[in-house]
Image (spheres, grey):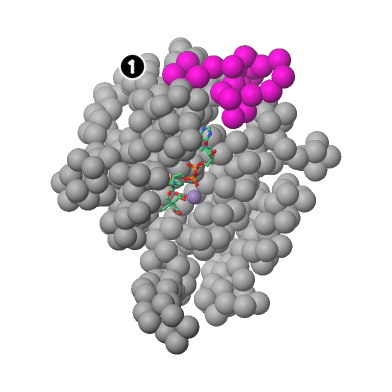
Amino acid sequence: MMNFHIAVIPGDGIGPEIMDQALLVLKEIGSIYHHEFRFSEVMMGGCAIDKKGEALPQEDLTICLKSDAVLLGAVGGEKWDHLPGDQRPERGLLRLRKELGSYANIRPAVLYKELKDACPLKSEIIGEGIDLCVVRELTGGIYFGEKGRRRGTMGEQAYDIEIYSETEIESIARTAFEVARKRNKKVTSIDKANVLESSRLWRSVMEKVAGEYDDVVLNHMYIDNAAMQLIKNPSQFDVIVTTNMFGDILSDEASMITGSIGILPSASLGEGKIGIYEPIHGSAPDIAGLDLANPIGMILSAAMMLRYSFDLESEAKSIENAVVNILGKNIRTRDIMGEGMHLVGTKEMGKLIADELR
Ligand code: NAD
Ligand code: IPM
Ligand code: MN
């Protein structure tokens, strides 16, 4: 029997609701395949601020650092929006990513044929289908550059510096080329090199690293064009590699063309370090506590954890198959609901996916 220790961060808003469903699925996997998953609950986000006075208390970070992998729901909400930047729930998440060295955020976006009706694009645009993967740099760029406020001649000023170093770009470039090698061998690097100095360095390092990967094709695109191309012709993309902020924005856009933000999972990885697995969406305060959230992004994130952190490919695949089977039976949460479909809530969706594993 294999034993895995998972740090579980339900977080805020819909976080706890969708996490319950992922844990249900993992427990089922444990019993079918005879693995022992040990779960340690970690407090992070607004709930940690309320209970312990900070977004990521040291003792909670320590549990993550001692775990084999971290599973995360979502953090944040209006209740904490008035706090200064360094005390917000989101800062806990940024610190966790930095402390774990999780610089590569892998966000696959696949349009399942079962969800074609949930895609807002016309079928002639969908063409051969959508199956792309955003590789987003996660521990650098404008999120982590110097920031501050000062008095200027035009009143108060605020700044956030976009800064990348060669080694950071090399690392994320290698991740993107490795991911592309296992896919359709095409990398599109997205930047704003016509304006930003940091993007010009980004582009030149991408070119340099591409030299090590003769079997992969690299092309470049400006972010504004990329945002448009994703809607105009999404099937041109295989792997998208981009900066922290551009990746944040483009992956939400990519999620919608595959049906809903509620279904996209992600893995945040570093060199041999502990991975963080979380859906790409946030805490969705508008639907929290209503049993309306789609738990699929969370459940597929658990599948990514089995694959990348524990090397349990068949177990990961069986979760992914269960999700597709349930969609194939026309079962939908509200965000992907369509005509003639059977509407279920968060809990029911989780239970049906867990039952489908047997
Ligand atoms: P959001 O992703 O929480 O919600 C955007 C919209 O998508 C909402 O209408 C929401 O109801 C819907 N949605 C999101 N997830 C869904 C799901 N699983 N099923 C069905 N519908 C879903 O983004 P937001 O509203 O901009 O942010 C809300 C809070 O979440 C903010 O505090 C933000 O900082 C935080 N946030 C956290 C994370 C994270 O923890 N990783 C990610 C993004 C945003
Ligand atoms: C995400 C979120 C986070 C980000 C926020 C909450 C810090 O939007 O995971 O996509 O911008 O990375
Ligand atoms: Mn985001």
Element under disc 1? helix
Within 8 Å of ligand 1, the CB of disc 1? no
- Type of amino acid at the residue the image marks with label 1: Ser
Q: Quadrant of residue 220?
A: bottom right
Residue at x 64% of width, y 35% of height? 259
Q: Is residue 202 left or right of residue 160?
A: right
Q: Position of residue 328 (x, y in %)?
A: 64, 19
Nearer-the-camera pick, 94 or 299: 94
Q: Quadrant of residue 73?
A: top left
Q: Is there any visible trace of residue 142 in the rendered image? A: yes
Residue at x 31% of width, y 45% of height? 45
Farthest residue to the front: give it.
155
Q: Is residue 171 left or right of residue 218?
A: left
How packed mark 1 is, by other alpha carbons closer than 10 Å (few <14, some 14-19, many 20 or more), is: few
Q: Is there any visible trace of residue 216 in the rendered image? A: no
Nearer-the-camera pick, 206 or 213: 206
Residue hosting label 1: 31
Nearer-the-camera pick, 78 or 6: 78
Range shown magenta: 327-350
When the figure is inspected, residue 84 is found, relative to residue 153, above or below; the finding is: above
Q: Is residue 331 magenta?
A: yes
Q: Position of residue 230 (x, y in %)?
A: 70, 51
Q: Is residue 39 magenta?
A: no
Q: Position of residue 306 (x, y in %)?
A: 40, 34
Residue at x 58% of width, y 25% of height? 334
When the figure is inspected, residue 97 is found, relative to residue 168, above or below; the finding is: above
